[in-house]
Amino acid sequence: MNHHELRKKFIEFYKKQGHQEIGQAALVPQQDASVLFTTAGMHPLIPFLMGDTHPDGSRLVNIQRCLRTGDIEEVGDATHNTFFEMLGHWSLGDYFKHEAIDWSYKFVTEELGIPKEKLAVTVFAGDKLRGVGLDEEAKQRWQSLGMERIDELVEDNWWGPVHSSGPCGPTTEIFVWSAEAEIPPNSLPGNDERWVEIWNNVFMEFNKTEDGQFEPLDQKNIDTGVGLERVLMTVNNYDSVYQTDVLAPIVAAISTDQLAHADRDVRILADHIRAAFFMIADGVLPSNKDRGYVLRRLIRRAVQAARKLDFTDWPLLTEAILGVYGPYYPQLLEQEIEAEILAEQQKFTKQLTKAVNFIEKAVQANQVVNDESAANLAFLAYQSHALPLELGYEILTEAGLVLGRKSFEQALDQKIKAHQEVSRAGSEKKFGGHGLILDTGELKASDETELKKVLRLHTATHILQASLRAVLGDQITQKGSDINADRLRFDFNYPDKLTAEQKAEVEAWANKLIEQGLPMNCVELSLVEAKKTGALHFFDHKYPDKVKVHYLGDSISDAPSKEFCGGPHVSNTNEIGKLKIIKEQSAGAGIRRIKAIVED
Ligand code: SER
């Protein structure tokens, strides 16, 4: 069965049961800014599940594009995708468990033709937490249909809410046996991973309140979600979703190898680039924040996979994606999506080159003598240049410097743990236990998203200092700096309150520099040489014999900003966004304090 047939069959089947077909929502939720992406077909329907009247009636059906990144580490296996399409149907206070179960059984066995012997189902086992018992009604209905394999589970058979509160309820799921082997007598979805879940009927009859209570909803709803890729996989007896006709052409564009569909990197590249296409089509662009950051991560993971595969034919990949999805999603054809992806790829490649140079320099300086020092170096490259750890490992392995993966990984684990402990110890003092992944004293970040923000603010701080000197005079020096994910804080010597014009001038000067898209470079020099460059530093500070100088632009001699600084920074000013001064105040006699933010 191909995807065209499946789409049609599903919609037609539920139309026959009185459902009205409704359109799709975008991947970026339009009415709900609190969630990054549309993760299920029910998401745009929440108000109607809660009781609002839907203009198309109480029985609805559609196919909804979805994005889930919670399982991103699992992408590469046979069944997990970030982007996928969900076949869905809903009852808004109309039919309930009996009809939903009967129709799903009929569709799976008759329309999809999957024999009953290859099916198992699960029902909610009940739990005290929610005050809801075993779903006898669903169980009995399945029994009346002759279903023999019925498992009773708790967490896997409860769905929602999407937010901390909202509609939710027990579920019954349908699984298909995916292996060639005979099904063992006691095999059930809860104890045997060879069962693949294809169908989720949610009995949305509760509202979880903000204080954690589960109260019955006024109307009992059905929310059914069916993974298009998984159905195609099971119905065609494929080993993975990458053999289905929505993904196989994409896989074929990546590699002509017969077994490419089983290769983890091919799968990651196919999955992530497909997701990136849909995200960009729905208005997301790579950035360091929220949706843009998720997109950036997906593209960068895809680029890494492409690098491993020596894959370069991006136009062919584009053609494959548009070939499959163009007829259903014309918006994909209307935009220059490939160009956006390639621009991000170039940015990433530049950053990688820097990181690789950093590793190579250390290798040339004979700093890597064993797996422990190799792991240290990989970790340092990750911290200061955002080099993915896996890539650090690869580069060091290619250079013949890693003796054993295991000892390397052990050393790396220790390094990460030690770092977390140092961060934690530091942060406990400052924030009473809030975990940090970066804490240099000046810069603080507790997760990857914050880290990106902090890097932008850090480079912006250097630019701010250069701007203040340009506008107010060269006598300006730094008296203090503190950066977290929300803002930068910069203290400097100046006797008077800044006028509105001065502030505007400083901002304008800074943003002009940022817009030039200058690279942030770093050299390590002897203290004497470093001072000769004219880089800003504290006169009363005791520096080590060797110091790092960070400077903007290609040449240190005429750099608009150069400072003694250990980093880390963004690699190019165009990652910063726009600098905005939000506060200017006194911070003691003759000292002014500026708080500023960066905006996308
Ligand atoms: N909301 C359920 C799911 O996402 C069914 O649509 O699985």
Image (cartoon, rainbow, N blue to C red):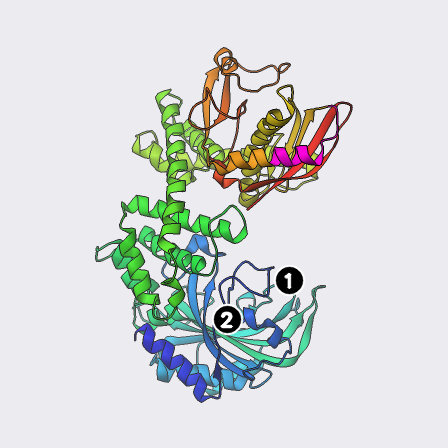
Q: Is residue 167 above or below residue 344?
A: below
Instruction: Kindly indicate the quadrant of the structure image that contains residue 310.
Output: top left
Mark sitting on residue 41: 2
Is residue 506 in the magenta section? yes
Mark sitting on residue 164: 1
Question: What is the x, y in percent for residue 117?
Answer: 36, 79
Q: Is residue 184 above or below residue 221?
A: above
The kind of residue on which mark 1 rests is: Ser
**Which portion, as a residue range, is magenta?**
495-507
Instruction: Name the residue located 36 percent from the left edge and 46 percent from the top edge.
Output: 303
Q: In the image, 376: left or right of 54? A: left
Sequence order check: which comes first, mark 1 or mark 2?
2
Question: What is the x, y in percent for residue 283?
Answer: 48, 58
Q: Main secondary structure of the magenta part?
A: helix
Disc 2 CB within 8 Å of nearest ligand 1 atom? yes
Instruction: Name the residue located 36 percent from the left edge and 60 percent from the top edge.
Output: 78
From where the camera sits, is residue 316 visible?
yes
**Which residue is at the far right?**
589
